[in-house]
Image (cartoon, rainbow, N blue to C red):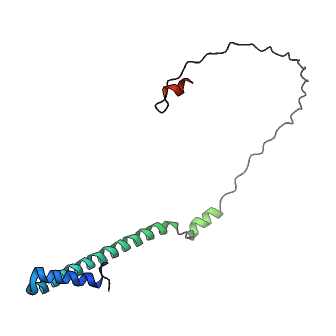
Amino acid sequence: MNIFGIGLPEMALIFTLALLVFGPKKLPEIGRSMGKAIRGFQEASKEFESEFKREAEQIERIVKEPMQATLEEPDPPALAAATEAPEAELPIVQSEPVESVESEPMESVESEPVESVESEPVESEPVAASPEQKPEESLG
């Protein structure tokens, strides 16, 4: 027998201590009040659990409703109006033939290589040491 993680020897010890502390006359009253309190706690927890489940089911139902695709038959007058659309006449466009254009070939241009300009090397200034580096590491 294991109630609330308490075995039979522990329950006997608790009962004996309660008998010694409260006495044999008050112990039945305390037992009744404890039983009522535990019963009330169980009812409250069941009510909370059922309310939680009910709310979760309601949310699931709301979420699933828009995802259900349904096909609705269109109204007969709207269907008839859509099928009896007047035929539009397309304008006839006449165009004249385009003459072909001939282009002249471009002359080829020879390119000359560009001489590279040598520059002097740029000297860089020392960078301040970061908080992680020691001053000796940043210089060398």
- Answer above or below: position of 15 versus 58: below
Q: Viewer-proximal residue, 116 or 90?
A: 116
Q: Quadrant of residue 5?
A: bottom left
Instruction: Say if residue 35 shows up in the picture.
Output: no
Q: Residue 115: give x, y in percent of width and height.
A: 80, 13
- State the residue at coordinates (37%, 70%): 55
- State the residue at coordinates (8%, 87%): 25
- State the residue at coordinates (15%, 81%): 18
Q: Quadrant of residue 104?
A: top right
- 26 left or right of 81? left
- For the C terminus, give its image quadrant: top right
Q: Viewer-proximal residue, 86 or 63?
A: 63
Instruction: Say if residue 66 shows up in the picture.
Output: yes
- Answer above or below: position of 9 versus 71: below
Q: Viewer-proximal residue, 111 or 124?
A: 124
- 120 left or right of 66? right
Q: Quadrant of residue 2?
A: bottom left
Q: Report the number of numbered marks.
A: 0
- For the N terminus, give its image quadrant: bottom left
- 124 left or right of 12? right
- State the residue at coordinates (70%, 53%): 88
Q: Residue 68: give x, y in percent of width and height.
A: 53, 69
Q: Residue 86: give x, y in percent of width and height.
A: 67, 57
- Answer above or below: position of 79 versus 17: above
Q: Viewer-proximal residue, 30 or 139?
A: 139
Q: Residue 31: give x, y in percent of width and height.
A: 16, 84
Residue closest to the far front: 136
